[in-house]
Image: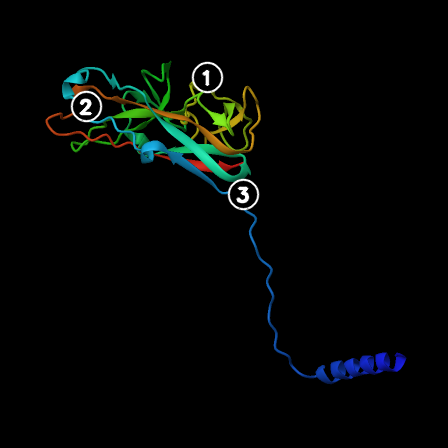
Amino acid sequence: MMNNITKTACALAVLATTSANVMAESIDVKVIGTITPSACKPALTGGGTIDYGVIPPESLNSDSFTVLDEKQVDFSITCDAPAKVAVHAIGAKADTTTNAKGNYGGYDIFNGVIFDTKSINVAGLGKSDGGQNIGGYGIRLVPGSYSVDGQSASLLMRKNASDSWTSSSYDKGSLFSFNTRDLQLTWAEKDGKTPIAFKTVAGKLGVQAYITEASALDLAKPVQLDGLTTLELVYL
């Protein structure tokens, strides 16, 4: 047995020695991969369209804005495995609001009342064919409507990724903020103060629009409401 081991070792040594002076080809071996969070998908009833239908011109106030009814739709997020997820809203056409004040770094503050609350932040409804700003709308996650994996849940908010989480009840779950466009909302256990992981969250999303004074619009032509908000999921 000892002789066999010795011969094998010598043979290897000889091969190594005779190959030392030969230029060898080479090939790289890469070890790659990606660790990703659980995939989560949002869903809205109606495909995400909030339709106010046909609004009779005579129903609009001539010299002041007209607040339309709030419309609520089902909103849910479903994940492959438990994950902590927040919602971030990106409101397009924010510069087409009316009857609002801004320039604070976020979304304009409506001068009237929507969601039964003063000073809710809003995005715009676009412009009419005549170039007039049509109005605005607020968007929110309706407090008290949400359940996480079948259990009642509370809403939390923070102004940016480095901020602390606080209750979102004081502003009725609004997805727009006056001094930031990085606002995030997430869910906690009932009356909890920290985000929780979930597989399913479900509740109501509310939108309430208003139309500028009728005297500022050319109502001899159809006026199309054209608001758009993207809801972005953020993994925490």
Q: Tell me which label, 2 or 3, sits earlier in the chain.
A: 3
Image quadrant containing the C terminus: top right
Q: Tell me which label, 3 or 1, sits earlier in the chain.
A: 3
Q: Which residue is mark 1?
A: 170
Q: Is residue 85 above or below residue 155?
A: below
Q: Which is closer to the viewer, label 3 or label 1? A: 3
Amino acid carrying mark 3 in the image: Pro
Left or right of 28? Residue 76 is left
* Residue 121 visible here: yes
Q: Quadrant of residue 197?
A: top right
Mark 3 element type = loop
Left or right of 183? Residue 58 is left
Give me the disc on residue 55. Answer: 2
Q: Which residue is mark 3?
A: 37
Q: Quadrant of residue 82?
A: top right
**Mark pair 2, 1: CA separation:** 31 Å
In depth, the one of 126 and 232 nearer the eye is: 232
Left or right of 96? Residue 75 is right
